[in-house]
């Protein structure tokens, strides 16, 4: 087909190629603009149908659509889904060997593909540089476009160069897509990609099937009983997010003690284990997965009934994107954040570790340079030790290494045992965003906005979110958040209980003086006094570790009787 595509042709392709009856929301307007050769910036909620806005044009127009996507797993899933619809799509990334990559690039050069998915790093690969002039790239789609902006919640150095890469392939008509973008981030995306007079379409969380809630907890020990209660009350698949891997693993054990089995997904698992967990969750009708925020981008599962956050996310943008994975089938879904004020310290640490100073960046470079030929014998842990990095969550070293790679100062990696310096670094060539105090300040302000949303909310959740993203606020109470509607009533009206989950264990312990107990796995102690009675009992325990007396409320703090 040619670029002259009318509305009837688009509707035929919508039905014949994608099995859909009608466009949703702004899809028609966006697709018609993109088909007509106009650049577009589109923000729509997760699951609202952004991908169709570049996939449908790809099948009705001549030429190749190049799709920039951040995750290898996400590409695999999207390409598999498109092939099932008869769309000629493929991906090229580091999961393939050189022969496979070359074969797919050759197929694209022969005009045998409609869509080709790549990561932004592929623009620096020799095989892609060789083939790019032969690919007849007519359109470009940038998925997860907030990664372009230094003001976005998931900035990535390679994304920041997509404007340069786009110019290199002839500045094709481009659509940038994201679920979350503040006005500042949206403007940065347009400028960074050098979009020409783009159509800008920005929508908010306009999905009434999602109930939005935040619950404040005063003690960390309150989280597990509350999470267990929610899981039991809502039948169907769900996701529970947590920021730290150790907390996920502890939560997995605690829920199991409560009779609830869960899957666990985090970065310390092997790629095969992560894939297995994801595939099991995708097939399941009621599995619950405990995950870090690495889980979800590649998960297109319609029937997720709840998304719970055991720890506060770093930004409203991240939270909005993650809860958007629920209820894609249009049925009711529960989205709740547990707000424990002390968790803010975790996210504040992440902010510091995500913003290395320019001096730190130069320190990483000088360390690599000083190692000389010994660099071949070093690894990431050696570099961390050299820079006195004690916390494994400190991401500054990895960020600096990525910038050195993007700038062409290094090639290879510690992971493949071939990291090497290939040229000198001129400090003047470091981007302004590296070490910028404005960037760090903006990140901290984002965390503050998240804390206010979770802990001090007195107005409709959707109104707060709309204002944050610079979108029109709801004209009336939304009726689907804990400010506008009684949460327990909404939950009992829309969900059935999880029949497979064991009931909450009853507390039948009878404590007495002389009992030996273990407290939080750290302290072994003996009960020296029992205060109160029934559900109001308190135990005064003397620890054998430091002989200190501790007053324990068994309802709020995990404690177990032991035989000694």
Image (cartoon, grey):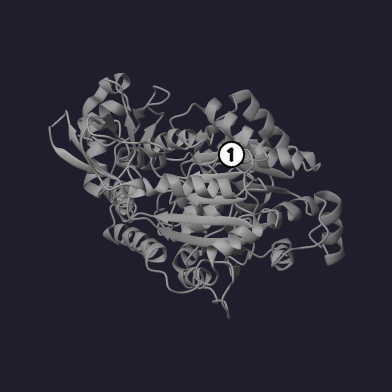
Residue at 66% x, 34% y is 105
- Between residues 460 and 184, which one lies in front from this camera angle? 460
What SS does tag 1 mark? loop
Looking at the image, residue 141 lies above or below residue 35: above
Disc 1 crowd rating (10 Å Cα; few below 14, some 14-19, many 20+) is some
Looking at the image, residue 100 lies above or below residue 463: above
**Residue 372, quarter of picture:** top left
Residue at 55% x, 25% y is 272
Q: Is residue 99 visible?
A: yes
Q: Which residue is mark 1?
A: 501
Q: Is residue 165 visible?
A: no
Horizontal side of 333 relative to 520 (left or right) equals right
Question: Which quadrant: the N terminus?
Answer: bottom right
Looking at the image, residue 355 lies above or below residue 209: above
- Between residues 562 and 421, which one lies in front from this camera angle? 562
Residue at 27% x, 21% y is 373
**Residue 486 at x, y = what percent?**
54, 67
Horizontal side of 132 relative to 399 (left or right) equals right
Question: Which quadrant: the C terminus?
Answer: top left
**Residue 21, quarter of picture:** bottom right
**Residue 542 at x, y = what percent?**
17, 34
Horizontal side of 109 relative to 342 (left or right) equals right
View extreme (bottom): residue: 475
């Amino acid at each position: 087909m040619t670029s002259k595509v009318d509305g009837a042709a688009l509707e035929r392709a919508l039905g014949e190629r994608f099995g859909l009856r009608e466009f949703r929301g702004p899809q028609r307007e966006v697709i018609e603009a993109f088909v007509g050769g106009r650049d577009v910036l589109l923000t729509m909620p997760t699951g609202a149908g952004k991908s169709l806005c570049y996939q449908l044009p790809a099948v009705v127009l001549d030429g190749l659509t190049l799709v920039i996507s951040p995750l290898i797993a996400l590409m695999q899933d999207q390409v598999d889904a498109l092939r099932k619809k008869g769309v000629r799509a493929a991906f090229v990334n580091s999961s393939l060997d050189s022969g496979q990559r070359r074969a797919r690039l050759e197929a694209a050069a022969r005009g045998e593909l409609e869509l080709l998915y790549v990561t932004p790093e592929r623009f620096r690969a020799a095989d892609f540089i060789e083939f790019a002039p032969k690919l007849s790239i007519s359109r470009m789609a940038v998925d997860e476009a907030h990664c372009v902006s230094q003001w976005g919640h998931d900035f990535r150095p390679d994304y920041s160069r997509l404007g340069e890469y786009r110019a290199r392939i002839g500045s094709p008509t481009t659509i940038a897509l994201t679920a979350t973008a503040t006005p500042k981030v949206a403007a940065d995306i347009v400028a960074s990609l050098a979009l020409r007079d783009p159509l800008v379409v920005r929508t908010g969380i306009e999905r009434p099937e999602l109930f939005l809630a935040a619950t404040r907890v005063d003690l960390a020990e309150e989280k597990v009983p509350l999470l267990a209660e929610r899981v039991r009350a809502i039948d169907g698949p769900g996701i529970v997010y947590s920021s730290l891997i150790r907390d996920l693993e502890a939560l997995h054990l605690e829920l199991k003690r409560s009779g609830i089995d869960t899957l666990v997904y985090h970065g310390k698992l092997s790629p095969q284990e992560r894939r297995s967990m994801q595939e099991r969750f995708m097939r399941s009708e009621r599995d619950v997965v405990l995950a870090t925020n690495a889980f979800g981008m590649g998960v297109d599962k319609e029937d997720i009934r709840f998304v719970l956050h055991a720890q506060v996310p770093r930004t409203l943008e991240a939270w909005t994107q993650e809860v958007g994975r629920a209820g894609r089938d249009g049925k009711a879904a529960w989205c709740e954040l547990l707000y424990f004020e002390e968790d803010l310290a975790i996210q504040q640490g992440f902010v510091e570790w995500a913003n290395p100073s320019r001096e730190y960046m130069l320190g990483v470079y000088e360390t690599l340079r000083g190692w000389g030929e010994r660099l071949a014998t070093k690894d990431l842990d050696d570099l961390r030790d050299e820079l006195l990095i004690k916390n494994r969550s400190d991401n500054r070293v990895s960020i600096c290494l990525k910038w050195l790679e993007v700038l062409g100062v290094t090639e290879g990696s510690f992971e493949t045992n071939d990291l090497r310096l290939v040229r000198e670094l001129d400090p003047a060539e470091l981007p302004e965003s590296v070490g910028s105090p404005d960037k760090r300040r903006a990140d901290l302000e984002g965390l503050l906005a998240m804390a206010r949303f979770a802990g001090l909310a007195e107005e409709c959740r959707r109104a707060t979110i709309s204002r944050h993203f610079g979108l029109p606020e709801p004209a009336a109470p939304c009726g689907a958040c804990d400010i506008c509607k009684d949460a327990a009533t909404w939950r009992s009206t829309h969900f059935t209980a999880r029949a497979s989950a064991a009931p909450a264990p009853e507390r039948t312990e009878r404590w007495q003086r002389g009992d030996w107990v273990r407290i939080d796995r750290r302290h072994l102690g003996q009960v020296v006094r029992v205060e109160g009675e029934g559900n109001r009992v308190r135990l005064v325990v003397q620890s054998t570790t430091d002989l200190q007396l501790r007053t324990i409320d068994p309802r709020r703090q995990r404690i177990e009787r032991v035989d000694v």
